[in-house]
Image (tube, grey):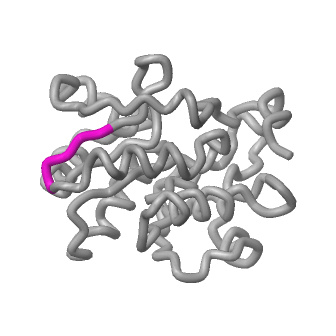
Amino acid sequence: MLLAAGGGRRLGGRPKALLEHRGRPLVEHAVRVLREGGCGPVHVVLGAAADDVRKRAELSGCVLADNPRWEEGMGSSLRTGLASLAGSGADAALVLLVDQPGIGAAAVARVREAGGSATSLVAAAYGGRRGHPVLFGAERWADIARTAAGDRGARDYLKAHQDAITLVECSDVAEAYDIDTVEDLFHLE
């Protein structure tokens, strides 16, 4: 699942999904990373400029879910994405954020391979510190959706269940920086 609904408030209102990376919208890069990491079908949560994202980005084969409450933060996008997976038969959801282009298919594959059961709770780690992507077994989705709020997403749930998290070191294959401010745009090519 790709969370790509943010409006880029600290980027002057430029939706993160449409930031250009390697000549294409950032959302396309993230979808490709998920697919190359072995994930599918890819569910993409859209919000800010959703119509423009649909027009400008090549998202064929993706399940697109609109978050009408995207301005409330990542928690609402996580809830929207988990709702879109309901009834899909998936055992787990691997969650990637659109604004982390330094995380590639190798990190996604490592996290995916460490989970996969309905009770899994797996996170990439960078120098031993928990980061993204994160994999949630299906049996955890309802509790995660219930606690996901604001820009904290699943942070509170993960903190409460930290003993159950399998950390997978990914610092040798990925960089976990975010594109949050104008100063961060140098990461994009």
Image spot of residue 114 (x, y percent)? 29, 45
Q: Is residue 174 magenta?
A: no
Give whichever of 113, 159 is nearer the camera: 113
Query: Considering only vertical position in the picture, is 114 above or below 4?
Result: above
The residue that appears at 80% across and 63% down in the rendered structure is: 24
Q: Residue at x 17, y 55 (%)?
A: 117
Q: Which secondary structure class fits the magenta region best? A: loop
Residue 166 image offset from top left, x and y in percent: 26, 33
Residues shaded magenta: 118-122
Residue at the extreme bottom: 60
Residue 30: x %, y % from top left: 61, 56
Q: Quadrant of residue 1?
A: bottom left
- Of residue 129 and residue 88, the one placed in the foreground of this image is 129
Quadrant in which residue 5 is drawn: bottom right
The vertical placement of 36 against 55, above or below, is: above
Number of numbered discs present?
0
Q: Is residue 120 magenta?
A: yes
35 up-or-down from 87: above or below: above
